[in-house]
Amino acid sequence: MKQTFLCLKQCSLFAGIDFDDIETYFSSINYNIKKYNANDVCVSTIDISDRLGIIIEGLVDIEKCFPNGKMILIERKRPSQIIGEASIFSQYETYTKSAIASKKSTILYITKVNLMRLFEKNNKIMLNYLEYISNSALFLEYKIGLLSLKSIKGKISGYLLHSLQYEKNLIVSNNILKLPFSKKEWAEFMDVSRTSLSRELKVLELDGILSFEKRFIVINDINRLKEIIYQ
């Protein structure tokens, strides 16, 4: 259980909360922990949206099915991140997105009633929750904007510029980023093929706009990168 609480301490929901306090709060509420194998469905759009999940270990893909039947990867979530945060207090009875384990994963679930009890115990937890869902909403806006870009070069540029501005944990230096995932996962995130992504990255490198090696990308000309989005 110590590993579980260490992970909870890293969760945005408990930012600024002492480790001992987290243990005390959880000793007075009900929660359950479930384990999943790779490709297991953790949360489905037919499930009642009455609980929030915190990933303890593993990786979980958040996917959205659109009316045309196409499934889009919205985000790949890692330990200490939250799933179901936007649905639990919404007017919708079921979740609007699915969560699927991309590898063996463990998730701690808290029902709406018990989450409310945590809010009552410390309103900092409630403020953290409000900040988290606000950031999630802004991320979804960004993702929709990224997917709406017509060219693969535009999507690459949009992703890199957004990361430079908002994803401080990915910045190695002023113009160097370290991708949080593989090229295959990056392609899935932008809904393009890996082959097409590799080809367009090579074109951008030959044009002198960027250079890359494995997960590291050096942006050589940020102004030209910005211009690509509007082409």
Image (cartoon, rainbow, N blue to C red):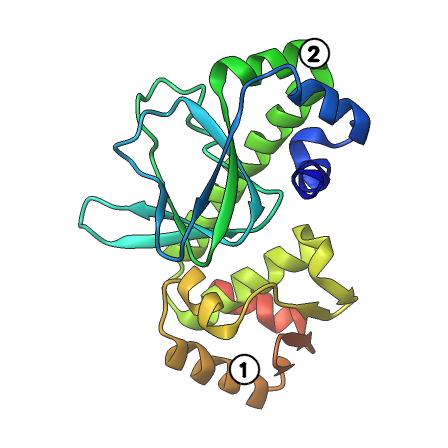
Please name the residue shown 64% across and 14% down the image.
28
> Hey, which residue is sitting farthest top in the picture?
120
What element does badge 2 sit on? helix
Residue 76's tag is none
Q: Amino acid at mark 2?
A: Lys
What percent of the width, then of the height, locates residue 39? Answer: 35, 56
Please name the residue shown 59% across and 16% down the image.
29
Residue bearing mark 1: 204
What element does badge 1 sit on? helix
Quadrant position of the C terminus in the picture? bottom left
41 vs 212: above or below:
above
Question: For mark 2, does the 10 Å Cα neighbourhood hold few (<14), some (14 to 19), or many (20 or more) residues?
Answer: few
Q: Quadrant of residue 119?
A: top right
146 vs 52: above or below:
below
Q: Amino acid at mark 1?
A: Leu
Instruction: Specify which label sits upstream in the sequence, 1 or 2.
Output: 2
Residue bearing mark 2: 121
What percent of the width, then of the height, locates residue 58? Answer: 53, 53
* Foreground residue among 176 and 49: 49
Please name the residue shown 61% across and 67% down the image.
179
Quadrant position of the N terminus in the picture? top right
Q: CA distance from mark 1 to mark 2?
A: 52 Å
Please name the residue shown 67% across and 68% down the image.
178
